[in-house]
Image (cartoon, helix red, strand yellow):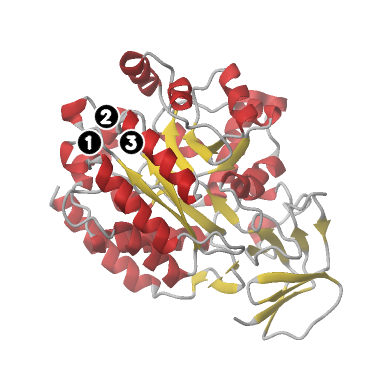
Amino acid sequence: MASILIKNTKAIITMDKDDNLLKGKNIFIQDNEIKYIGEQIDEADEIIDGSSMFVYPGLINTHHHLYQTFTRNLPQVQRMELFDWLTTLYEIWKGLNPEIIYYSSLTGMGELLKYGCTTCFDHHYVFHKASSEKFIDTQFEAAEVLGMRFHASRGSMSRGKSEGGLPPDELVQSVDEILYDSERLVNKYHDSSRYSMKQVALAPCSPFSVTSELMIESAKLGRKLGVMLHTHLAETKDEEKYCIDKFNQRPLEYMESLGWLGQDVWFAHGIHFRDDEVRKLASTGTGVAHCPVSNMKLSSGIAKIPLMLKEGVRVGLALDGSASNDCSNMLAEIRAAYLLHRLMSSSNAPDGYEILKLATKGGASVLGRNDIGSIEIGKAADLFMIDTNRLELAGALLDPKCMLATVGYNRPVDYTIVNGKIVVRNGELCCIDEKKTASIANKLVDELIKNS
């Protein structure tokens, strides 16, 4: 790798422990690490003029479904809530194949990078009984092409309709199949070293699509292999009713009975936790991926983020699936989260900077990492830059820490750097032909919808 000097920055929003905002400073990157921040000027292979740039830590997406990129904006599901939405889309998702997985991953991660996201966790759980054995391998290929820091999951569904679950039986697998492939993927891809670009989590889908046996055995395997655990939880009242009716327990109580609480666990959504359950999350160190736009789109509810932050729950920001968001834009998510909680909680809501923290340091904590999420010496060189010399930002520069939430930024960023490599330059991806990729992707979308 080469060295990069970002010279004379307008502002560096460091997100360090002292919340420092630095002006007029330089950032020197060597290989994949931030080596220096200050006034010194070093020679570098590439020098970027930062005099009009706000520099932010790379955003961290803690829950996504990249395959859903090809089922965005479907007219037939626009008025549905989660269970009906899922059962409708499962019939389309039966048609997933390796090419669709590759190009949907390339498209979704490409969009993420263009909007400042440098680390993506993806929760893939749809495996057809035929031709799906290399889906996660294919995602890692796409991430490597783009230069995305990628956390994959070996998701799973083991309880089909015939056993009282939600998904069709064609999309469920046996516990043995799931555990075998989970171990294969961890052994092949998971890298726990500092600045790791590839990690794997074990992620059974949800209480209404997996068996208790799978949850228990996945937790045992994950802890044996030293990887994180993830699932959807407390997303809807329908899920809550399902758990009470089937297990005679509330969702969090059910997870606790299966060994699914702790520092190595995080849940997606977490909307319908009671106050005492929020305190349980805090006391056990269990994390939450907050998905505000998806939660609004599916009319699922509003998570108690002000209470979670007050109680010390680890919270990261997340997009959720592209079919319930319907985009892969973390900058848009930041502003939506800020406005949603201002509406609901007024002065008790997180301010714009606190929402930015969820999308950076919070996400790093949820994913179990201490090498990303801030701009500091010794951290991974993950950041993005916005040129503030634009008409739409005139008068908006008084508070760089809050700007992304209060004013918002609705165009691709000028630079995204991941692991010390420029992957977005002047708003365009560096490693792929965007127009060619979009053309192939749209043809695959047409085929997927036509064949469903």
Secondary structure under the numbered disc 2 in the rendered image? helix
Q: CA distance from mark 3 to mark 2?
A: 24 Å
Q: Position of residue 102 (x, y in %)?
A: 31, 63
Identify the disc placed on residue 88.
1
Residue drawn at x 14%, y 47% is 452
Q: Which residue is mark 2?
A: 84
Horizontal side, residue 393 vs residue 340: left or right: right
Q: Position of residue 59 (x, y in %)?
A: 59, 54
**Front-lying residue, 332 or 189:** 189
Label 1: how many Cα within 10 Å (few below 14, some 14–19, many 20+): some
Mark 1 touches mark 2? (CB < 8 Å):
yes
**Front-lying residue, 291 or 129:** 129
Disc 3 marks which amino acid? Leu
Q: Position of residue 326 (x, y in %)?
A: 40, 46
Disc 1 marks which amino acid? Thr
Horizontal side, residue 292 vs residue 360: left or right: left
Q: Which residue is mark 3?
A: 214
Q: CA distance from mark 3 to mark 1?
A: 25 Å
**Front-lying residue, 228 or 373:** 228
Q: Earlier in the sequence, mark 3 or mark 2?
A: 2
